[in-house]
Image (cartoon, rainbow, N blue to C red):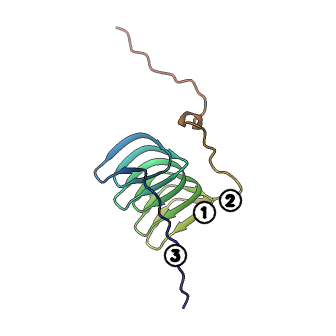
């Protein structure tokens, strides 16, 4: 009855973590990244994060846009949009201006949406500006 044309946006993938890749730590990047492997820790970008069907991410994610096709355990904060594809599984909270949850996607958490005129995340010029200024306390070695 209605012929709804889907708009397909081609994104240039700048960074790619292939199947079988394991990374643990803080990942920061510009542009677009695709993850088909396993990432654990924290992901910070103003760009787009794509998690493929084989991707497993156990991280706190802060990004411009996030497209999930695989599995995410952790909270996702996106200034623009979050899209959950049919086979995706997300366990955690979503915070964004726009969210799309397609049939077959699973969300185990809460979704908080804010008006588009309100910026959700303020990005600094570098990763350190995203963290509060605290003095690091390093453990001292026990003397014998």
* Residue nearest the observer in this picture, 32 or 108: 32
Do the residues bearing badges 3 and 2 touch, measured as CB atoms within 8 Å? no
Q: Are there few (<14), some (14-19), or many (20+) residues within 10 Å of tag 2?
A: few
Which residue is painted at 50% across and 50% down in the image?
31
Quarter holding the C terminus is top left
**Nearer-N-terminus badge (1/3):** 3
Disc 2 is placed on an element classified as loop
Q: Nearer the viewer, mark 3 or mark 2?
A: 3
Query: In the orientation shown, which residue stands out farthest toward the left?
Result: 20
**Could you classify mark 3 by the number of other residues whose Cα lies within 10 Å: few (under 14), some (14-19), or many (20 or more)?**
few
Picture coordinates of residue 132, whole percent (x, y): 60, 33
- Percent x, y of residue 39: 38, 47
| Point 32% across, 52% down: residue | 18
Q: According to the image, label 2 marks what residue? A: 116
Instruction: Tell me which residue sits at (51%, 22%) in the image.
Output: 137
Give the x, y percent position of residue 53. Answer: 36, 62
């Amino acid at each position: 009855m209605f012929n709804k044309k889907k708009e397909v946006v081609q994104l240039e993938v700048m960074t790619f973590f292939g199947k079988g890749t394991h990374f643990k730590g803080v990942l920061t990047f510009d542009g677009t990244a695709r993850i088909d492997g396993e990432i654990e820790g924290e992901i910070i970008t103003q760009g787009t994060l794509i998690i493929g069907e084989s991707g497993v991410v156990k991280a706190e994610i802060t990004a411009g846009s996030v497209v999930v096709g695989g599995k995410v355990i952790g909270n996702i904060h996106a200034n623009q949009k979050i899209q959950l594809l049919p086979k995706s599984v997300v366990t955690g909270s979503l915070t964004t201006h726009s969210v799309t949850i397609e049939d077959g996607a699973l969300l185990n958490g809460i979704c908080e949406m804010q008006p588009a005129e309100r910026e959700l995340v303020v990005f600094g010029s570098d990763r350190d500006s995203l963290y509060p200024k605290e003095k690091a306390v390093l453990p001292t070695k026990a003397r014998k």
